[in-house]
Image: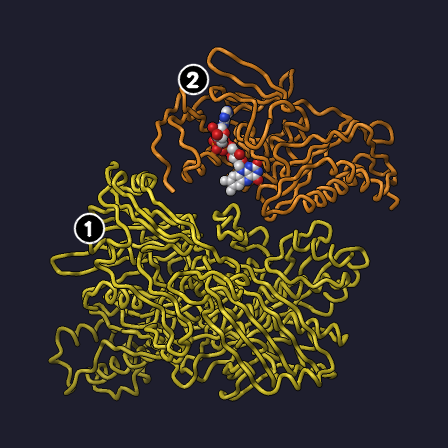
Chain colours: A yellow, B orange
Amino acid sequence: MTANLKTGASLPRRTAARLVAGKGRYTDDIQVAGLLHVAFVRSSYPHARLKRIETRAAADMPGVVAVLTGNDLAKVCAPWQTQLALLPSHLSPPQMPMAQGEACWQGEAIVAVVATSRALAEDATESVEIEWEELPVVADVQAAALADAPVVHSAMTSNLGLDHTVSTGDAEAAFRQAAVTVEHTFSFDRQTGVTLEPRTILAEFDPRLQQLTIHHSHQVPHQMRDIFAAQLKLPLSNVRVVAPDVGGAFGLKLAAYPDEMAVATIAVLLERPVKFCADRLEAFVSDNHAREAKVHGRMAVDADGRLTAMDVSVVSGFGAYSAYPRGSVGEALQAVHMVAAPYKMAHLRGRVRGYFQNKPPSGVLRAVGQPIATTVTEQLLDLAARRLSLDPAELRRRNYVDTATATARSAGGIVLAELSLERCHDRLLQLMDYATLRQQQRMHRDKGIYRGIGLAAFIEQTAVGPTLYGAQNVRASAQETCRLTLEADGAIRCATSITDQGQGTSTALAQIVADALGVDIETVEIATGDTQLTPFGGGAWASRGTALGGEAALRAARKLKESVLGIAGALLQTEPDLLKIEDGRIYNTASPLPQMSLADIATTAYFKAHLVALTELPALEITESFAPRDLPYVAANGIQAAHVEVDVELGTIRVLDFWVVDDCGRVINPLLVDEQIRGGVVQGIGAALYEQCIYGADGQLENGSLVDYLVPMASEMPDIHVAHVQTPTSATTLGARGVGEAGTVGAAAAIWTAVNDALTPFGVVLSEQPFTPERVLDALAARKD
Amino acid sequence: MKAPAFAYRRPDELAEALSLLADDGAQVLAGGQSLIASLNMRLSAPALLVDINRIGALRGIEDRADGIRIGALVRHVDVLHSPVIARQVPLLAMALPHVAHMAVRNRGTTCGSLALADPSAEMPALAVTLNAKIVLEKQGARRTVAARDFFQGLYQTDRQDDEMITEVIFPRAADDEVFGFAELARRHGDFATVGIAVRARRSGDTLENLDVVIFGSEATPLLSPATSALRIAADATAPMLADMAEAITATMEPMENHQGRADTKRKQAAVLLRRTFRDMQSRAFAGKGNGHD
Ligand SMILES: Cc1cc2nc3c(=O)[nH]c(=O)nc-3n(C[C@H](O)[C@H](O)[C@H](O)COP(=O)(O)OP(=O)(O)OC[C@H]3O[C@@H](n4cnc5c(N)ncnc54)[C@H](O)[C@@H]3O)c2cc1C
């Protein structure tokens, strides 16, 4: 083809320059006449009965239009309840936009003050009086599990929300026969997504047309349209949800949040436009949290270093309610099912229990549970390597499951296909010069400098299909759709169900469409995020944008090309097979001169169709959908490595270098893929070293600001070197796998193995994430005694 | 996170600012890097903000007979890049790279930091180490307080509500003085978990007259009372320096918080001190073959 092929080229994100220049148009930037603002009174108690709510004084404050309670909103909004068909024991009480009668976490919205400005609304919140009766609090997961624990919500009979087991092969026998058995306990502190743009929603209701229009900082506008319509009892076609520029999402903007439902409800109730933009403190106490888990893991290895069995027990924290509509079980299930996914291992025994707690609901966060499974597996492998006096890289090399078929399954049931773990591994060792680093490590140790090298191989579930939520009876679409239109001026309009919160999928789609059609990429316009303008589909979740949205776009582009060439053939009186499109112009393969342009085709088809000598005019607007239906998801794989230095006197950890070799199949845009991997790695490093929602035993969040909740910052981050192995998936014609979560799946594990490798001379293995200086010093002190 | 309503004035003259400050509920707005955040979080609700940013008399770093003067409008960034400071108050120059990030340093002021008296801030600790003179003015009155008498408790100082810190005067470093500074922060630019500042005099083969201040962990900068007998000899060994560090940290009363327990901070302070002593020793006696561990 032509030299200016876009697929595989590192084109910068289309929106990058605009966003960096401060020209973003986020939900909070949208101007609406007569706009009202909402500020919430939130529960300061993790668990309390609402005995009396007095709103009169607040209602009399300047600028206040309404002060509303849960009971007021219940007149318009129906309750919802998270239910998962395959997990009937995952029982979360019905939820309302604001608490009625009982608050179950610190931060739950209780009263909404609606005023002409946010500042006035906040002023008035201080005049709302609530009489509380404190109820017993269950904060810690282990406390929630106790037989005599109080219940998180008075409608529940037990805090247990999940008890699930996995049993493959005969783990017990494998442990009996193992040459080496290792075990360790792992604790993962709660974290949250910390999006730069907080959750924001603007709701407008037109009572004449009964139409609800919502601008929403969200990943899945089609899902939210379905939910708003159902809860507010409006016909689906009367609801429009638009996600404009969205400043980060990471999975936390996948849920239907009660306070956001409240805003939509208020718009309907008051028939006035209303907006809510969470401030940072509200974000910390009301965004979904994730990762809270305690794990005990055991691993059995034979004398040749072959992994034979694992036994894992996971306790996961759900928060007060199960996130709607996807539930809060994803993290817990993945933590068990994904263990040892990259390795040949015949026997697995796993049990996972999840408990409700008086804390904000937990939901999905980039990589959902996979980082936990990867950390447990990789750390145990390192411990086994030590016991066998084998190099950790060599131990892994002996165990990879490099399957070429599409039917292999890991012991945890993970469907594996067309993997490249061995190639990724070899490439990584070469990239990082593993042997030299090991040598230097020994030299440094002699000088009292403790450096560690950590590896983490991983499988990433990407491009998840309908079997995940479809089977649970959850209305979260897994299908992605592209509607491609030849515009009257010859440009291409690509409306996609995929949404973009900074990933750059719009750019990747433009590349795919430009190449498949043979047009200048500048003439391809991408429309996303608006349920009125884009076809129905999933949006952004489970690393699907380019893999699935790109596949739909490719299929649509190929069909549109056929239509265009069909019409061109008729006009030029040539067989369409002898025509091609390059740079938006139609050529006869026999001649170097362009015959006509796409604009000519559009003009003829749209205004002078009588000139086209075809009985049926081929469609110039094509809609194609795609969802993987033979596979539950498309597995991607890779390996990461961290090089760290631990200051064993201060307890501090410096990440010196980081490497990733990833196989996301066909790379459509290396720049975007590398951005995704680096961002994901940074999030994983954040988890291992910095991020934690610190709750007291009383259920109060003690670090609800960015001064105290530490996110990874540029000055602490190492260079992250990325290389690719490309094994196109046969599940699509495009061949791209997902990559959005790859970095996060493995990075924390690589930090765990690296830090613990550095501490080997002390015989210390850390077990609590994040590795704060105090935790490092405590572990060292406990060992020295 | 919107501030409650307040009145706002931005006078051009110091006298006018001081007369505005005489009103109840009036508060100085300097760089705003701490104050604006606390307003937005509704942690404070002043009736009137007196913005001092237009008052020319408060600008400038000056090399004066009584020391190096830093006016109330001098930003952290000005101090960081000042050749006068680098030469005359090297301890400040050593510490400034640890103060916040560039954006905050561009606006935050030295005097604002002293007025705020955040326990984790560097400026109060350095002022105590060097016993800087803090100049306070109110309508019709001016007084000077030694930094060692100024800090009274967590965010508490000797300053009255109607007083402004108009300048701080740091003593000029003497030729025989040697300084050391170190701090532990989780991320670069974060407030310190624990930090130390040291001044000593070189006399022959020893460093003596040690002033050691520990901050971050304490409610106010802690000037160690345990240093009068301590000396760092050119040939002091690491264990000797470690013993000194431990004698000093024994007097700490660290606050427990998410950055760590008291014992952890004491342990970390001792490490910082030992390393800083070692560093000062090698700078003071460079080429003298110090350090037999
Ligand atoms: C992200 C971030 C990180 C930071 N990290 C650090 C750090 O590592 N180390 C550090 O030391 N600081 C740090 N700071 C704080 C920064 O240095 C502040 O700017 C400084 O503490 C206060 O100076 P200011 O001029 O901004 O004061 P303002 O915010 O304007 O005022 C602070 C308080 O002091 C009062 N005040 C100010 N000036 C005067 C005056 N001349 N007389 C009387 N009262 C006055 C005000 O009324 C107010 O009560 C950080 C700030 C941020 C936002």
Residue A518 appears in the picture as rendered: no
Q: In terms of depth relative to the viewer, which is nearer, A46 or B201?
A: A46
Quarter of the view holding residue A446: bottom right
Residue A190: x percent and y percent?
52, 59
Residue displayed at 41% across by 82% down: A732
Q: Which residue is mark 1?
A: A272
Marks 2 and 1: in contact by CB < 8 Å? no
Residue count near mark 1 (Cα–Cα under 10 Å), binned few <14, some 14–19, many ≥20: some
Chain ID of residue with mark 1: A
Residue displayed at 68% across by 52% down: A651
Judge from the rendering whether residue B163 lies leftward or rightward of residue A440; answer left or right.
left
Residue displayed at 63% across by 47% down: B260
Residue displayed at 24% across by 53% down: A72
Q: Which residue is mark 2?
A: B22
Alpha carbons under labels 1 and 2: distance apart: 45 Å
Q: In terms of depth relative to the viewer, which is nearer, B185 or A507?
A: B185
Q: Could you confirm whether marks 1 and 2 are on the same chain?
A: no
Q: Amino acid at mark 1?
A: Arg
Judge from the rendering whether residue A197 lies leftward or rightward of residue B223; answer left or right.
left
Judge from the rendering whether residue A206 lies leftward or rightward of residue A401; answer left or right.
left
As drawn, B3 above or below A186: above
Chain ID of residue with mark 2: B
Q: In terms of depth relative to the viewer, which is nearer, A461 or A612?
A: A461
